[in-house]
Amino acid sequence: MAAGCVFCSIVAGETSAEIVLDEPDLVGFLDARPVFKGHVLLVPREHMVTLLDLPGTLRDPFLEAAQRLARTMVDGLGAQGSFVAMNNVVSQSVAHLHLHVVPRTKGDGLRGFFWPRTKYADGEAPEYAARLRAVLAPRA
C-alpha cells in the first residue's frame, strides 16, 4: 500500500467502494464519478503507478479481467459495447494503475477524449454493482 493512495485504501477496505470484482491480485470497483453508470475501474492490489510498472506475471490476468468486465457491460447492463482506456501519468487522476471499462451504447454522446461525468442517485450504485457481479464469470 502507498500512503495517501485512494485506490490502495479501497483495496485494503479502508475506503468504501462498490466492489464488482475481487480476486487475489486484482480489484474492480465502480468509479465514483462515472462517465456512464456501471463504469468500472480495474486495479492491481499491489500499488504500481503505470502500465510500465505492471509485472509480466500480472499482464495476462489483468487483461483477462478487463475482457470479462467488458463482456459484463453487455451481459449485465445491456450495453451494446464498452470503452476500455488507461492513462499513464498524463491525465492520470490517481497515481495507481487503473483501467477504465465503460458501458457504451450507440448515440450515448461520448465523443473523442472528453469524458463527461455523471452521478449515481441514492442507492443506485449498489444496484449497478450487483448487476455486474451477478453476471461476471468467475475465473476458470
Image: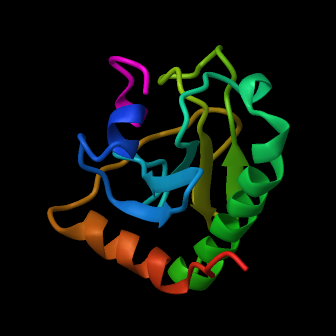
Q: Is residue 4 magenta?
A: yes
Coordinates of residue 123 in the picture (x, y in percent): 17, 68
Query: Looking at the image, which is closer to me, 138 or 130?
Result: 138
At a point 57% along the width and 52% down the height, the residue shown is 26
Position in image of residue 44 (x %, y %) = 59, 42
**86 w.r.t. 17: above or below:** above
State the image quarter where residue 107 is shown: bottom right
Residue 106 in view of the camera:
no
Instruction: Give the percent coordinates (x, y) of residue 131.
Output: 42, 80
Q: Is residue 40 left or right of residue 73?
A: left
Numbered marks: total: 0
Quadrant for the C terminus, please: bottom right
Quadrant in the picture for residue 12: top left
Image height of 81 relative to 86, above or below: below
* Picture residue at 45% right of the left edge, 65% below the top: 20
Q: Quadrant of residue 5?
A: top left
The chief SS type of the magenta part is loop
Quadrant in the picture for the N terminus: top left
Stretch in magenta: 1-7
> What residue is rendered at 79% in x and 23% in y?
52
Q: Is residue 75 highlighted in magenta?
A: no
Looking at the picture, tell me which residue is in the foreground, 95 or 118: 95
Residue 37 vs 73, above or below: the answer is above
Decide if residue 94 is on the left or right side of residue 58: left
